[in-house]
Image (cartoon, grey):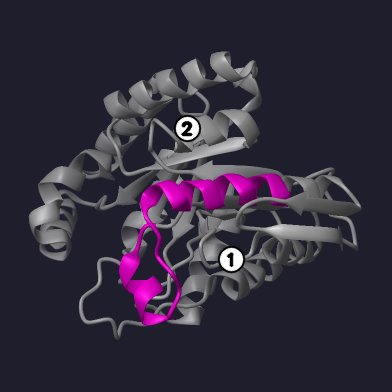
Amino acid sequence: MAINLGIHTGQQDCTYEELRRVWRLADSSGFYWVSTWDHFYENPTVDGKGDCFEGISIMTALAAETENVRVGSLVFGMGYRHPAVLAKAAVTIDHVSNGRLELGVGAGWYELEHDAFGITFPPVGTRMDILEEGVQIIKSMLNNDITNFHGKHFQLTDANCFPRPVQTPPRVWVGGRGERRTLRIAARYADGWNAPYISPDEYAHKIEVLEEWCDKEGRDSSEIARTINVGFWMGATETEAKQERERFQAQYGRQSEERGGGMLFGTVPEAIERIGQYADAGAQGLNIALRAPFNWDALLAFAEQVLPAFK
């Protein structure tokens, strides 16, 4: 059973050298994808003082540090990333990566980081409107030399996008699980859709909703790539797997039961079985989401024993 496997590096509570080590391992081991996130604070937040590298600059470093993997973002928050400026940054990253960019965007949800940085955090309906306008602008910037757009939240007049991307054009991903707006926006505009941290059964349901929106929008649903992020709490041994589950429960506390369905627990056989369930549910790609401290033994076991099972 073939499925593209990737790594999603939440760049928090770790050093830059540790990130480089993960990226290099992925690039040399046959992973398809490596992505970064876009937060100002660690998540889950402990005291707001944890290290967390900025999203665009760290994604550029990822592009420069690798040669083979797709270079992704899951996802840039449209509420604090002007879409035209983000498109320009994305084209730069596409050149740095020699055409490996995968640009993911979302509506944003983390109110703390908006408040702390003095960025308006409007109601969810408004955030979705901002996302929908932003996706249209980004798609235009990546596809056209000049973009004009006059919406409620963004206005562009003769905005250029030179140099052109290496790809013709890069894929734009919409991230999120909301069935009324997020999946509709994905059906209208996205080249790829990613959902984080849900079980295979729930993921299969979300795909059904996405396909229903595609039917209503007159879109061929096969044009949209579909991936899932799962938390990586696998162990290289039974003892280590138990320790990782305990670490997950300690980190997420009351949320651990709710989030557990979207996590990868156990050892290699359990990981292979679980990934197969996501593939059966319709996922074309699966990214293991890492949180520091990184479990290097488990990551190597995944690369050496799980990855080949899905080639």
Residue found at x 42% / y 43%: 176
Q: Position of residue 100 (x, y in %)?
A: 72, 52
Q: Residue 158, percent across and down?
A: 88, 59
Kindly identify which residue carries mark 2: 183
For the point 70% across and 70% down, which residue is it?
64
Amino acid under disc 1: Arg
The circle drawn on residue 37 is none
Q: In this view, does 292 lie above or below 161?
A: below
Which residue does the numbered mark 1 point to in the structure image? 81
Location of residue 254 in the rendering, given as x and y in whole percent from the top left corner: 8, 56
Quadrant assignment, res 46: bottom left
Mark 2 or mark 1, earlier in chain: 1
Identify the element where label 1 is drawn: loop
The residue located at (36%, 22%) in the rendering is 204
Q: Distance between the residues labelled 2 and 1?
A: 21 Å
For the residue pair 203 and 181, the one nearer the viewer reads as 181
Where residue 25 sits: x, y (%)?
53, 61
Secondary structure beneath disc 2? helix
Asked if residue 192 lies left or right of residue 269, the reply is right
Q: Closer to the camera, 26 or 257?
A: 257
Q: Which segment is the magenta one? A: 109-138
136 up-or-down from 277: above or below: below
Residue 132 on the magenta segment: yes
User: Total label count?
Assistant: 2
Majority secondary structure of magenta residues: helix
